[in-house]
Amino acid sequence: MADEEKEKELAGKRGESDTVENPDEAVTVEEAETSQESETEVLQRDLADTRDQMMRIAAEFDNFKKRMEREKSKQLKYEGENILRDLLTTVDNLDRAIEQGSAAAEDEGKKLQAMVQGVELTRKGLVATLERFGVESLEAIGMPFNPDEHDALTMEASGDVAANHVLREFLRGYRFKDRILRHAQVVVSSGPKKSA
């Protein structure tokens, strides 16, 4: 045994040691290798988890986008529902006016007057409904001619209305919020009549 110890000492001095002098160091080297392998495995698991989370988020976003498109399509499909519901009241009022006009009455003048009043009330209700939804009539008579709001049908001489101003209105124009729904059809003044 003494010979083996001497050989170890000589080998240690030469740097040719086949065995590790401290067994604790051997365990530490093995633990380090195992630790590196387990750290790699942990990082790979974390990477896989992150990929999975990203795939789930992408799928959730895709589902959200599809749901928003369905809701938008549904909203566009039934967009005019509110105004149509309100217009039904106008139809009901017109039906009542027709009933009044058809009913037998002793005095035809009163019957006609009642029918005209019913139609006027119906018109007021319809205009109120349109105004609630942002539709307003364009003022034209006496206003300067504006090609963005008016369609000139003809020009007439007038001593009362200045040149290039609206003299008469054949068809009223309407605006919806900031857009023209329909241009007013008007007669434009050419100024005072020129004598020959």
Image (tube, helix red, strand yellow):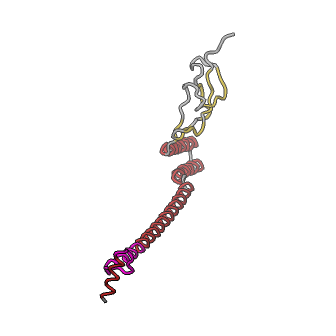
Q: Farthest residue in the bottom direction?
A: 1
Q: Quadrant of the C terminus?
A: top right
Q: Above or below — where is 55 with respect to 190?
A: below
Residue drawn at x 65%, y 22% is: 156
**Residue 123 locus on image (x, y percent):** 53, 43
Q: Nearer the viewer, residue 69 or 60?
A: 60
**Residue 24 locus on image (x, y percent):** 31, 79
Q: Nearer the viewer, residue 194 or 116?
A: 194
Q: Above or below — where is 182 with respect to 75?
A: above
Q: Nearer the viewer, residue 8 or 82?
A: 8
Residue drawn at x 53%, y 56% is: 72
User: Range of the magenta residues?
Assistant: 13-37
**Residue 43 locus on image (x, y percent):** 43, 69
Q: Quadrant of the N terminus?
A: bottom left
Q: Farthest residue in the right direction?
A: 196
Q: Is residue 178 left or right of residue 31?
A: right
Magenta: main secondary structure equals helix
Q: Nearer the viewer, residue 62 or 169?
A: 62
Is residue 93 within the magenta segment?
no
Asked where in the image residue 25 lies, by quadrant, the reply is bottom left
Q: Above or below — where is 19 with respect to 133?
A: below
Q: Is residue 27 left or right of residue 125?
A: left
Residue drawn at x 62%, y 29% is: 186
Total marks in image: 0
Q: Farthest residue in the top direction?
A: 196
**Residue 97 locus on image (x, y percent):** 56, 48
Q: Is residue 109 left or right of residue 53?
A: right
